[in-house]
């Protein structure tokens, strides 16, 4: 979902984009690089003539948090990132670019901070990039994920990790799952005062492109809008945009049925007030600063 948008923005800016694809041979146009992250297969010279790599791949988070699902979530992110980081580091050592080091923009998530205050080794309410990782499952995944990306920095590669919040798009993620329920008039809030740090699809894609093109951007960057909302407020705004009711909260057993108790706690009921200050300091101008603006845009609804 995000990668497609990033490719469109980069191509629209006149940059040559090559997609990493999971098949044995590239197409005839020469704009694909084959790889198999599960088997650890990626040509040694894949990135020799590449300036930047944007790596967002990973097994979908949505699903019951069984042992097998958790294994696939972690393994896909850790092993895939390890492979990409190794290859771009090798390319940087072997064939340095004359106009500056290569760049690796690697995915991560606000799950880094832990789902709730009880999962964090600090007392901070506002979550900023300098804080340590939390203690729950997703925080551990994000910590290992980012560690693998940072390995490329030892070779001189500029590495930035994008800690993405709840992406607002009808084509995937949490919003896509909520839309049928709210449209049918049976959707409501997930939780109450838990803070949800969100970002529109347009903004997360634009931020990633901005990080690619900004030489001073390195280290973790939160990809969240400047105005997080509570779960109650999110449900009210979404219902208003769709002109549907949202008075009845979703029973707590609903998320547990879909995600398991651990998944429900770490995803659907997470409480994370995440700062967008670093992204703004780096010069990213948010297109959608308020949730109602973002939802009107992504859902194609006209404002009153």
Image: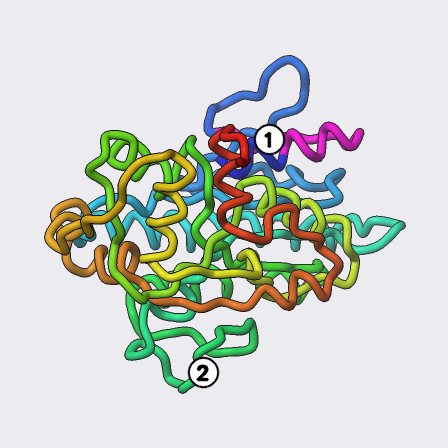
x, y percent for residue 51: 75, 44
Q: Is there a contact, CB below 8 Å, between mark 1 and mark 2?
A: no
Please rate how many residues cluster around mark 2, counting C-alpha atoms within 10 Å: few if below 14, some from 14 to 19, many from 20.
Answer: few
- Near-viewer residue (92 or 191): 191
Nearer to me, 108 or 244: 244
Is residue 153 toward the left or the right of residue 262 in the image?
right
Residue in the picture at 50% in, 66% down:
147
Residues drawn in magenta: 7-21
The structure's colour scheme is rainbow
Residue drawn 31% across and 66% down? 193
Image location of residue 181, percent across then percent down: 24, 35
The disc, 1 or 2, on the residue closer to the chain's N-terminal end is 1
**SS of the residue under disc 2:** loop
Closer to us: 197 or 29: 197
Question: Taking the image as drawn, is residue 109 in sight?
Answer: yes
Residue at far front of view = 304
Specify whether 17 is left or right of 189: right
Check residue 50 for magenta coloring.
no
Per the image, the residue denoted by label 1 is 19
Rendering quarter of residue 100: bottom right
Count the marks: 2
The kind of secondary structure element at disc 1 is: strand
| Residue 180 at x, y percent in the picture | 28, 31
Which residue has dot 2 on it? Answer: 124
Residue visible at 34% across and 54% down? 74
Q: Compare residues 300 and 141 and report the one nearer the observer.
A: 300
Residue 52: where, in percent of width, then height? 70, 45
Given the current orientation, which residue lies at the most extreme top position? 28
């Amino acid at each position: 979902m995000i990668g497609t948008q990033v490719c469109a923005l980069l191509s629209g800016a006149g940059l040559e984009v090559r997609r990493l694809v999971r098949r044995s041979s590239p197409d005839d146009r020469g704009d694909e690089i084959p790889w198999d992250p599960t088997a650890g297969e990626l040509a040694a010279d894949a990135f020799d003539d590449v300036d930047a790599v944007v790596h967002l791949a990973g097994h979908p988070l949505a699903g019951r948090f069984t042992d097998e699902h958790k294994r696939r979530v972690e393994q896909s992110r850790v092993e895939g990132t390890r492979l990409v980081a190794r290859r771009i580091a090798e390319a940087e050592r072997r064939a340095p670019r004359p106009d500056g080091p290569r760049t690796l923009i690697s995915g991560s998530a606000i799950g880094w901070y832990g789902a709730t205050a009880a999962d964090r080794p600090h007392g901070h309410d506002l979550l900023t990039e300098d804080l340590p990782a939390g203690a729950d499952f997703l925080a551990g995944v994000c910590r290992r994920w980012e560690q693998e990306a940072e390995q490329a920095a030892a070779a001189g590669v500029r590495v930035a990790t994008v800690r993405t919040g709840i992406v607002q798009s009808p084509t995937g993620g949490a919003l896509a799952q909520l839309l049928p329920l709210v449209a049918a008039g049976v959707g409501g809030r997930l939780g109450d005062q838990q803070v949800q740090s969100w970002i529109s699809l347009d903004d997360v894609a634009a931020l990633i492109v901005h990080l690619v093109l900004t030489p001073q951007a390195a280290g973790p960057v939160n990809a969240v809008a400047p105005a997080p909302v509570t779960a109650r407020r999110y449900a009210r705004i979404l219902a208003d945009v769709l002109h549907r009711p949202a008075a009845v909260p979703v029973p707590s057993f609903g998320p547990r049925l879909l995600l398991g108790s651990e998944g429900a706690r770490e995803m659907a009921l997470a409480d994370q007030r995440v700062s967008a200050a670093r992204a703004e300091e780096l010069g990213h101008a948010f297109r959608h600063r308020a949730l109602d603006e973002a939802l009107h845009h992504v859902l194609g609804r006209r404002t009153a």
